Image (spheres, grey):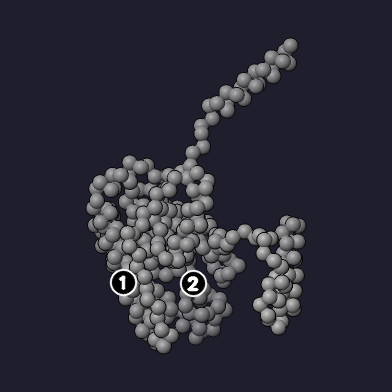
Amino acid sequence: MLQYQSCGIFALLCVSLISFTPSCDGGNILVFPVDGSHWINMKVLLEELHARGHNLTVIRASTRYGVTALKHSISHFKITKFFLSLLYNVHLIWTQCAAQIFDDKSLIETLLDSKYDLVLTDPAIAPGVLLARYLKLPVVLNVRWIPSGEGHLAIAPTPASYIPAPGSGLTDNMTFLQRTKNLFFYGIILFQQRFIVGPHYDVVCQKYFEGECDIISVLQEADIWLFRSDFVFDFPRPTMPNIVYIGGFQCSPWTFKNPPLTVRCQACGCPHANSAAGALDRFTSVVKELQHTGL
């Protein structure tokens, strides 16, 4: 009898715990994306977040800005000049948009009343980071680039002696002349930050935020950096504990719906189809075996 009473009390306790357990609701996320190819990366995250029950509010521009294609005959100097001019105008437009958002008191009140849990943004163009600071919300960055260059430059040590600057075409093993070239490319990045991009954000920071700050210090306050890269693809470099590398997250899962690679190569009429496809098929089979063995 005592055993049955104990079982009944235990069952009642389990039911009570289940009844009073708080429900697990999705988060309320404010998203400030960047248009163009950056939106492709953000869309993958948003679709997964939506599938998991999170509430998403996306701020986007009413119009899209395209860039006409450049001819290959244009010199490197003209391309660089065009790129710097484009950077100047794009960040000027978006900082003005951020100022308009901050001046719209009804919009700010609506955003505050929505009680967002965090802001998810791409800092390649950084009004989303400024908005998160203005609303005093945590920030998660979907990042590869920041306004002045590669994302690591703002948060992690970047020794020019063995970390090649973007666009330099160098490796982590450099001679003295190559390190001099690397410093030159880093100088271009610093020039962009100091004279091309930074002044636009300095105006907004001085007007709307208390204390001295700039766009780099605001970026450094971000809580999590979802970095679209991986150590497999980059040279070794210092990093930070709040950087999460998500390189390859855009790739779709492998499916067996497609015909074997040998069949597809033979269909294209390539003379070396059998040897090339056979080698790739053997490689994929080895990878599958490693996956099954847990290596």
- Residue 143 visible, this angle: no
Within the image, what quadrant is residue 264 found in?
bottom right
- Residue shown at the point (71%, 82%) measured from the top left: 272
| Circle 2 residues within 10 Å: few <14, some 14–19, many ≥20 | few
Identity of the residue furthest to the top in this view: 1
- Residue 2 visible, this angle: yes
Kind of residue at badge 2: Pro
- Mark 2 element type: loop
- Residue shown at the point (46%, 83%) measured from the top left: 181
Query: Label 1 vs label 2: CA separation?
Result: 27 Å
Q: Is residue 35 above or below residue 15?
A: below
Residue 173 position in % (x across, y down): 57, 79
- Residue shown at the point (38%, 67%) measured from the top left: 147
52 lies left or right of 14: left
Residue 74 position in % (x across, y down): 39, 86
- Residue shown at the point (54%, 81%) measured from the top left: 174
Question: In the depicted view, which residue is nearer to us: 170 or 274?
Answer: 274
Of circles 1 and 2, the one toward us is: 1
| Residue 214, label in figure | none
Q: Name which of mark 1 and mark 2 comes first in the sequence.
A: 1
- Mark 1 element type: helix
Q: Quadrant of the N terminus?
A: top right
| Circle 1 residues within 10 Å: few <14, some 14–19, many ≥20 | some
Question: In the depicted view, which residue is nearer to us: 82 or 40?
Answer: 40
Q: Quadrant of the C terminus?
A: bottom right
Kind of residue at badge 1: Tyr
Find disc 2 in the rendering and name its residue: 159
Residue 38 position in % (x across, y down): 44, 64
Find disc 1 in the rendering and name its residue: 88
